[in-house]
């Protein structure tokens, strides 16, 4: 399948602030009464949600952080490079894909409050992944990374931050 066929088949739509395309595939009917974050602003929340996420050579997942863990699952396409910037000032690059002997990981966990940004590995055309969050994702949870602030906090990753930050 080509990119347009995948988008149509899975009903993907543009993910405006982050980049790429997505479709929510699951949202639990089980509701928790008070989310353990967001200052208690939201009083109810789905216990889990899942999406498909498609990255193309013209898009990337802009640096952002979320208040709960996010699990990435690789489905098909080309490998992804994911930058994770940790609260202690360190960071790491993880390669997401299905070539296990090359050190790629088909499942990656981004811990809560870790800045994350992803792009296709050089030469890649697309990657289809899924992500799962518990409690479930809400758009109000998304915190976009600020390029200048992140470079000050993580100077050794300044080149990658420049590639992965929208602002």
Image: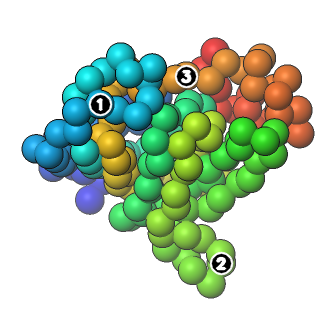
Indicate whether 138 appears above or below 29: above
Q: Residue 20's spot in the image, x, y percent?
A: 41, 35
Q: Is residue 96 something that shows in the picture? A: yes
Identify the mark at residue 123; answer none if there is no mark: none
Q: Depth check: 160 or 43 in front? A: 43
Whole-Å distance between the Cαs marked 3 and 2? 31 Å
Q: Nearer the viewer, residue 109 or 121?
A: 109
Residue position marked by numbered label 2 in the rendering? 102
Drawn side of residue 69 relative to residue 34, left or right = right
Residue at image coords 40%, 61%: 73
Secondary structure under badge 1?
A: loop
* Comparing labels 1 and 2, the label whose residue is closer to the camera: 1
Residue at x 73%, y 32% (from the top left corner) = 161
What is the number of callouts on the image? 3
Q: Residues within 10 Å of mark 2 (few under 14, many from 20)?
A: few
> Disc 1 marks which residue?
34
Which structural element holds mark 2? helix
How far apart are the alpha carbons under marks 1 and 3? 24 Å
* Residue at image point 82% right, 28% down: 153
- N-terminal of the two: label 3 or label 2? 2
Camera-nearest label, 3 or 2: 3
Mark 3 lies on a secondary structure that is strand
Asked if one can make out residue 3 in the rendered structure from this viewpoint, the answer is: no
Give the residue number, with chain letter if any, for mark 3. Answer: 144
């Amino acid at each position: 399948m080509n990119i347009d066929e995948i988008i149509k088949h899975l009903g993907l739509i543009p993910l405006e602030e982050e980049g790429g395309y997505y479709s929510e595939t699951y949202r639990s009917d089980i509701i928790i009464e008070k989310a353990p974050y967001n200052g208690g602003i939201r009083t109810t929340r789905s216990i889990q949600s899942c999406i498909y996420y498609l990255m193309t050579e013209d898009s990337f997942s802009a640096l952002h952080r979320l208040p709960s863990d996010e699990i990435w699952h690789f489905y098909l396409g080309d490998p992804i490079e994911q930058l994770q910037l940790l609260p202690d000032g360190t960071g790491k690059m993880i390669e997401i894909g299905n070539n296990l002997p090359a050190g790629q990981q088909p499942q990656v966990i981004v811990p809560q409050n870790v800045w994350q940004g992803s792009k296709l590995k050089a030469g890649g055309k697309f990657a289809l992944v899924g992500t799962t969050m518990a409690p479930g994702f809400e758009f109000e949870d998304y915190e976009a990374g600020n390029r200048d602030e992140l470079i000050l906090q993580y100077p050794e990753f300044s080149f990658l931050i420049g590639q992965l930050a929208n602002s």
